[in-house]
Image (spheres, helix red, strand yellow):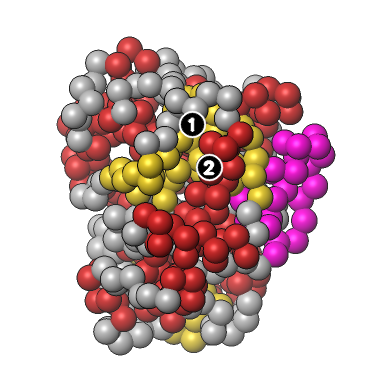
Amino acid sequence: MTFTSTRSRQAPAVDFRTAMFQGLAPDGGLFHPSHEPDLWRLLSSLPNSSTFTAIAEAVLGELLRDDFPPDVIARLTREAFPFAPSMSRLHDQHLILELFHGPSCAFKDYGASFLAHAMEASLLESNQRAIILTATSGDTGSAVARAFFRRRNIEVVILYPSGRVSPLQEKQLTTLGDNVVALEVQGSFDDCQRMVKEAFRDPGLNSRYRLTSANSINLGRLLPQALYYVAASIWLGMQPLVFCVPSGNFGNLTAGVLAWRWGVPVRQFIAATNANDVVPEYLKTGQYRPRASLQTYANAMDVGDPSNFERLQLIFQDSGLEMRKMISGERVDDKEILETIGRVRREYGLFVDPHTAVGIVAAERYIERAAEPTTPVVTLATAHPAKFLEVTEAATGERPLIPERLAEALGLPKQAIVIDNTLEALTEVLELRYST
Ligand SMILES: *Cc1c(COP(=O)(O)O)cnc(C)c1O
């Protein structure tokens, strides 16, 4: 498989490793597969008792065979995915695909972990080192930190805004140590992002260090997210499904759409958003109007200008009509989020987090309307309820069990370097820690 920019499809294609280390295409577009492989035959040959690792190995082995030999793919998938998705059921027609069993308790663990292991394998092979530089407002940073922790030949520098991430998120970022450095920036998330962008543009820094981003638009994070759509489909006997995806930046949904293009039978996608409903509005009106984001309970989805919309437009050839045939949009507000977390606990005995609640509401609306009540709807559960304790507790009056891997971080001491919100301050840390 090769990759070209969403903005110039005639530009020369690059291999997976190049796309992974560059992050963004030179013209500012996103790397996207140049062709759509047909995996239907391969997927149909996998028994529905296959493990997630076996499915991942088969699919990635096919997609990345020009970049990694089969034995390396086998090792990468085994090491990147010591965790797996599981399915639970609200009722006959509504299934939940739980994606929060990884180290940071959110679906971003799948992409981050594969990216970390693939980068490590490439760097070891070429005997090079890289520094991952990333800004976070909370959730992404913890997945990236955990994924890259103790990966060889890689240093990780994470910038987060002082006092603006939740106490649990701060612990997840700052208690690892070793090759993970947390910088507590005296400023906002926008300051953190600006500093990272300035560093990537600085010729001096880039000649001294191999700086790499690990943000969510990276192909190395996007591709592995297609794997759990494939797995759900195989586990349910390759029958056509409806996938309901709680969405913010639309990486998760885009990965699902790719899986469909490669042969996973899908009847419909539901793009479930919180009050930041730019895409549902586009699907309804044909008008795409990005705007500043609004703050909601499902804060990892507070995105007013989703970057992956560019990939979706390319897949559907800029045709709103084609996109609408495959994707329907639903907006869910904070009041419904709270009400739903409480109701799902009462009716089904299940705790869900605010992001998953957005998906559940959207799926329920779809089921109510559907002409064909037999197609199962699979809602993606994107985070563990214990990650959003305050909201879950307020909605249910109970406290979900906190998984060991989250509780552990809470008991460890914070280690962060406090810095000013300037490129100079960031440069100083890089020089002190990494100059040779
Ligand atoms: C990032 C995130 C989302 C949104 O995923 P996108 O790929 O950005 O659409 C949803 N839920 C949780 C818990 C997240 O962390």
Q: Is residue 24 visible?
A: no
The spot of residue 431 in percent (x, y) is 45, 75
Query: Looking at numbered disc 2 in the image, what kind of residue is underneath it?
Result: Ala
Magenta segment, which residues?
273-294
- N-terminal of the pair, mark 1 or mark 2, is 1
Per the rendering, the mark at residue 363 is: 2
Quadrant where the C terminus sits is: bottom left
Relative height, residue 241 to residue 435 (above, below)? above
- The mark tally for this picture is 2
**Residue 277 colored in magenta in the image:** yes
Query: Looking at numbered disc 1 in the image, what kind of residue is underneath it?
Result: Val
Q: Residues within 10 Å of mark 2 (few under 14, many from 20)?
A: many
Q: Secondary structure at mark 2?
A: helix
Residue depicted at x 34% and y 34%: 232
Q: Residues within 10 Å of mark 1 (few under 14, many from 20)?
A: many
Pointers 1 and 2 in contact (C-beta within 8 Å): yes
Residue depicted at x 47% and y 54%: 356
Q: Is residue 289 left or right of residue 94?
A: right
The spot of residue 18 in percent (x, y) is 45, 38
Label 1 residue near ligand 1, CB within 8 Å? no
The spot of residue 419 in percent (x, y) is 53, 84
Per the rendering, the mark at residue 242 is: 1
Question: Front-most of 388 and 114?
Answer: 388
